[in-house]
Amino acid sequence: MKRGSPLLQNRETTRREEQVAPERMQPEHAQLCLLGRPPLSRFIECAEDLVMEGARLDRAALIEAWRAARHYYRDLEVREAGIADHGEPRELDPGVVALAAQVQAHPSYRSTFDTLPTHLGMVELDRLIVHQWHVTQSVIDKGKNRMEGARDAATVFRICMPLEPPDLLVQVQHLGSRRFVFRCESEDLDFLEPEMLSGVHARDGFAVAHAVGLVLGFGSNFLSAVRLGNRVVLNNGYHRACALRALGMTHAPCAIEMATCLDELQLTVNQRVAEEIGSYLQSPRPPLLKDFFDPRICRLLPMRRRVRQIEVEFEVRDSLISE
């Protein structure tokens, strides 16, 4: 990778070059990536796998950029020591109390937050600890456009605590009598569970005894975090949190799970946080949401387009057994 490649440019430099070649410098799937915090080996592996033309990246320059960001983080550990320990959540705006009650009574909220005590409050965006090291710029921009004309408390609350299902296209390919492939641009598509179906009474003249469905779909999409002591780790809603912060907002409505010890926290946090718990809860200055807005540790990289693909294949065994 050459000195002038996007990895080593801050966003100010990138904006100047966008005037010459906007499609090259800011593709639809460009990602804001944090340097210095992921373990170096994982960072290189992800960069080579996900960045466009990643196989041709200059590893020496990649390591140099990571090292510079790491040194800057060490400086922040001195200058901003304890910053994550003072993010006391606020109460919700009185105007959204009725909306909050509606959300808390909804089945999707109850099924999502059924492990730890959870309440709705306003988290301070700049003090949120982050474990995700890249976010999609175009998704943040869409969120900003959606909220820019209406920043009242009720609109922001509904965006952060949506109850309506997402309007996303899921493509299906029938690859065999018992094999299907599902594709979606959203990484939130997931296999949910097998389910016994009722109300299926006949098929092609045959009486139906039972019907089983293999269910795919989308889980809840609440902006959520988990709190241990005074530290709050953002679990879900990174793009909305970044969009709100980019619009100048300091706090956001959030479902906050309350952990009293590390064992409880590990039940609900992202697996990466569970594996590297010290980096997030013991570091004097862990990675924060505001780091995505600091050009000294964040770079805009052209990433490959990715889609979620789930393959479902089932097996039927038919036998006679003696009882």
Image: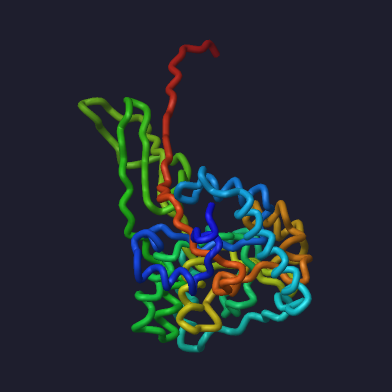
Question: Position of 198 compared to 85: left or right?
Answer: left
Q: Which residue is drawn at 41% across and 68% down?
A: 17
Q: Tag count in the figure?
A: 0
Q: Can the viewer see residue 98 in this picture?
A: yes
Question: Position of 134 compared to 263: left or right?
Answer: left
Counting from the top left corner in percent of width and height, residue 266 is at 70, 56
Position of residue 1 relative to residue 140, above or below, is above
Q: Residue at x 67, y 79 (%)?
A: 87
Task: Locate residue 285: give its quadrant.
Answer: bottom right
Q: Can the viewer see residue 110 in this picture?
A: no
Residue found farthest to the front: 3
Task: Locate residue 26: give its quadrant.
Answer: bottom left
Name the foreground residue: 323 vs 295.
295
Name the foreground residue: 9 vs 239.
9
Residue found farthest to the left: 205
Counting from the top left corner in percent of width and height, residue 165 is at 37, 60
Name the foreground residue: 53 vs 284.
53
Residue found farthest to the bottom: 94
> Which quadrant is home to the C terminus?
top right
The way the protein has been coloured in the rendering is: rainbow
Question: Position of 44 compared to 78: left or right?
Answer: left
Name the foreground residue: 25 vs 146.
25
Position of residue 35 relative to residue 99, above or below, is above
Counting from the top left corner in percent of width and height, residue 123 is at 59, 78
Q: Which residue is drawn at 46% across and 47% down?
A: 53
Counting from the top left corner in percent of width and height, residue 281 is at 75, 65
